[in-house]
Image (cartoon, rainbow, N blue to C red):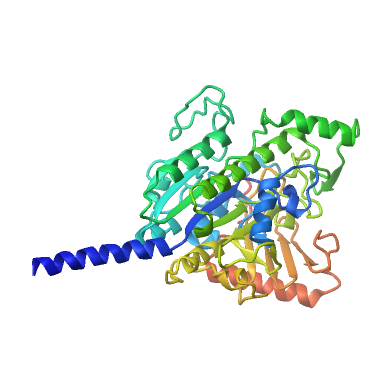
Amino acid sequence: MMFRFFVLLVLNGLLACVVHAERPNFLFLLVDDLGWADVGCNGSDFYETPHIDALARSGMRFTQGYAACPVCSPTRASIMTGRHPVRVDITDWIPGMDASRVKDRKFEHVEDRDNLALSEVTLAEQLRQAGYQTFFAGKWHLGDVGHLPTDQGFDFNRGGHDRGSPPGGYYAPFKNPFLPDHEKGEYLTERLTEESVQFLDTRNTEQPFLLFLAYYNVHTPIQAYDKRIEHFRTKRDERFGDSPTPTIAERSGQSRARQDFPDYASMVAAVDDSVGELLQTLERLGLSENTCVFFFSDNGGLCTKKTAGPTSNLPLRSGKGWCYEGGVREPMIVRAPGVTQAGSTCEFPVVSMDFFPTMLDLAGLPLAPELHADGTSLVPLLKGQAQIEHEPIVWHYPHYHGSTWTPGAAIRDGNWKLIEFYEEGRAELYDLSQDVGESNDLSEQLPEQTAELRRKLKDWQQKMGAKMPQPRQLD
């Protein structure tokens, strides 16, 4: 009897190893504030991203991949949970900008959570339960002690805490409680890459893995990457000389209208160098053919502020903090060996909640719609299908933001996109199939279409219990 029990244990152990071996690994690369137009494969010719472009040529590039919010923490929560930011009650960056800073505002501050609730089941928790080893490095921004990556399903945490920008900047000392300094002056992106490579080299090879690297780049403070800065200064001087950077008025703000800032370009290059090193590590370890790679950004590039931001998102309008395309459309690449065709492109609109069910599906695990309630598996698209059943995409951003955005919301249904501006009491309507730059407002020409989308947006907000901005109470 004991012998039979032992044999069963051995067989079960071997079966578990086989199952783990058959399941793909996951490498998720999340860049902070990288704009849709900041990569070469989406048209940038000032920034240089050869490794990211090569990843796109080896997998599928999504031309209409959207963040769930035009700022960081809500989108990060949506990736981790497969749930809309409204559903997890994180609708602004943590802790957000106090509305009292805005002169003559019409609305009170909208309160939301300052951490991701422990009751939420994350992608990492779901994969770990299925036998995955889980590693997190970089920017977390979903809570402090008690709500860290290691409290939300990750076995390892290198540098993730509550802060949204690196507290010590991009050069050591980092002043990061979860990333001890190694060498004075070391560069943060290089260090996070080093930690990720070390995990790949020392991981438990009997388990599949989720490696989630969330770069702090290219978030402010804008600090040049010393190894690449001179190249881009020379490039700027040769291409533009003394020509001043053009700007575009955006209500009370200004948008940068040209990619020409060397410091920012060098920070983009630092990310690209890291992507190249990680992909080379997968090759060196023989993991490329069994590792699905995801590349994404948490919101649009910082383009619009009271004075112009560090990047330009043209041909998209505006940037981080805004519900125009420049604030929510992201560079998105997925390489799933045996699933995606090299060099393929997907034009279908998708959103950050979709990553959770997609990764479960790729892992051969059952979908859990009670968890990823607002996400849809993209596997049919990855296999080359032209479209799937997908709910309209909604952005609910009832907060004031330093980009000069005021409370509002937006909905995309098919090619139609409607944006509501609550301070102005009006909405704008665009046909993205004809006007990706959102320059031709059709709301007055098409009042019935405008009213229909406003109704759909309001119905969604009521169904989800979305917090709406309340009129300011004057003393």
Up-down: is 52 above or below 17?
above
Up-down: is 89 above or below 418?
above
Query: Number of callouts in the render?
Result: 0
**For the point 71% across and 67% down, which residue is it?**
347
**For the point 71% across and 73% down, which residue is it?**
414
Front residue of 356 and 200:
200
Q: Quadrant of the N terminus?
A: bottom left
**For the point 83% across and 43% down, which residue is it?**
258
Front residue of 295 and 466:
295
416 vs 22, left or right, is right
Front residue of 312 and 468:
312
Occupied quadrant, residue 348: bottom right
Can residue 321 be seen here? The reply is no
Indicate the position of residue 290 as horizontal and vertical percent values.
49, 59
Q: Residue furthest left?
A: 1
Indicate the position of residue 142 as horizontal and vertical percent values.
48, 47
Indicate the position of residue 244 as horizontal and vertical percent values.
88, 34
Q: Quadrant of the C terminus?
A: top right
Indicate the position of residue 6 as horizontal and vertical percent values.
16, 64
**For the point 37% across and 57% down, which residue is it?**
128
210 vs 131, left or right, is right
Front residue of 45 and 399:
45
Can residue 206 be seen here? The reply is yes
Up-down: is 267 above or below 54?
above
Q: Residue furthest top?
A: 184
